[in-house]
Image (cartoon, rainbow, N blue to C red):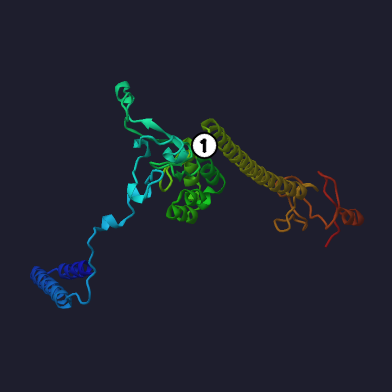
Amino acid sequence: MLLLAIMGIHWAASASADPAQVEDGLKSQRRCSRYFLFGIMAVLMLSLQGCEGDIPRHTVGNWRGKPSYLAQFKYIPPGKNANAAVLNSCSQIGISPTLQCNGRGFCRYFSTNSAVAAQANPISFCQCDRDWADPECGTQRKSQRTAFFWSLFLGFTGADYFYLGYPLWGLAKLFTLGGLGFWWLIDIVRIASGPVYAYNYRTANDLPHWVALLIVIFIFMMIGFIAAIWSYLVYRRRKREDIALLQNDEEARHWKNTQEDYAGLYGPRHRTKGPVSFDGRPGFNGYGTAVQMPISPNAAYANGSYAPYGELASLPPR
């Protein structure tokens, strides 16, 4: 609002053609802007208040208030309490391999050097199975296969993002109907290409790549086939419309010519108004002998006033 007010004052001041008025307008603009800023600063200073009541205090940092990584993925050796929890079960000596990594993985050496592997207790960490994650293999991964089929059949509703733990992205995809189809197709290819990230870990690699590839190729072939059929049907309908228009034009032109042929069916046209001969009979119209035809040939034969072409009919005197 302040910027709009300054621009309005500047426009009003510069709208005048008199240089003196322009200079006065700029001076008044600067003065008004200065007073306005001083007024805002005064209002802010007067509105400041001291804190009242008990101020919350804490002796532990806020970053320590969040769940501890060690507490979330801790490993408690058998027969000990929570105070003996450790982060890496592979660093403990004398523990059965079935108890390490929650029984869902195995301990893998950090270094492949033979000298390091020959040590009594080399550094090693849990290598989890396909469907499990976290340092102690205690968190089950989302399924890539499930996410792919959600994306394939209900991707335009954002079902794949809801499954992966991204509700906001799912709502955005739902309200846009899969980005008008483009976002939907992109996610199909993206999820089929490999394990994607869920809200915490990657999805489990339980979808064979060749299966996903065949499905994607088949889907896009079907889309291309449907688009080709639809395009062909539209083209055929337009061709039929064009042919129908041409036929209507041809029939209209033929009917016009037919009407002209019908008009000259009974010989040359005669003049109803024009020059007459000395005896009061119709004269020539340029096409040969022209007589004033009766209403119909039958009537002409009846009263004897019809004559073949080239002959002059004997009409009764008026």
The answer to which quarter of the image holds residue 65 is bottom left
Question: Vertically, is 228 above or below 283?
Answer: above
Q: Residues within 10 Å of mark 1 (few under 14, many from 20)?
A: some
Determine whether, in the image, residue 213 is placed left or right of residue 270: left
Image coordinates of residue 180 in percent, x first then y, are 49, 50
At label 1, the amino acid type is: Asp
Q: If the image is split into quadrants, where does the N terminus sit?
A: bottom left
Image coordinates of residue 272 in percent, x first then y, are 73, 58
Can see residue 247? yes
For the residue pair 34 and 151, the one nearer the viewer reads as: 151
Question: Vertically, is 255 above or below 50?
Answer: above
Question: Which residue is label 1 attached to?
Answer: 206
Determine whether, in the image, residue 221 is placed left or right of residue 268: left
For the residue pair 101 and 186, the one nearer the viewer reads as: 101
The answer to which quarter of the image holds residue 224 is top right
Determine whether, in the image, residue 297 is placed left or right of residue 212: right
Give me the residue at 76% from left, 55% from top. Answer: 282
For this orientation, the residue located farthest to the front is 79
Please tell me how many numbered marks the rendered image carries. Answer: 1
Question: Vertically, is 101 above or below 2?
Answer: above
Question: Vertically, is 241 above or below 272?
Answer: above
Image coordinates of residue 74 in percent, x first then y, are 37, 46
Q: If the image is split into quadrants, where does the C terminus sit?
A: bottom right
For this orientation, the residue located farthest to the top is 114
Can see residue 202? no
For the residue pair 209 and 239, the one nearer the viewer reads as: 209
Image coordinates of residue 316 in percent, x first then y, are 86, 58
For this orientation, the residue located farthest to the right is 302
For the residue pair 211 and 214, the one nearer the viewer reads as: 211
Q: Secondary structure at mark 1?
A: loop
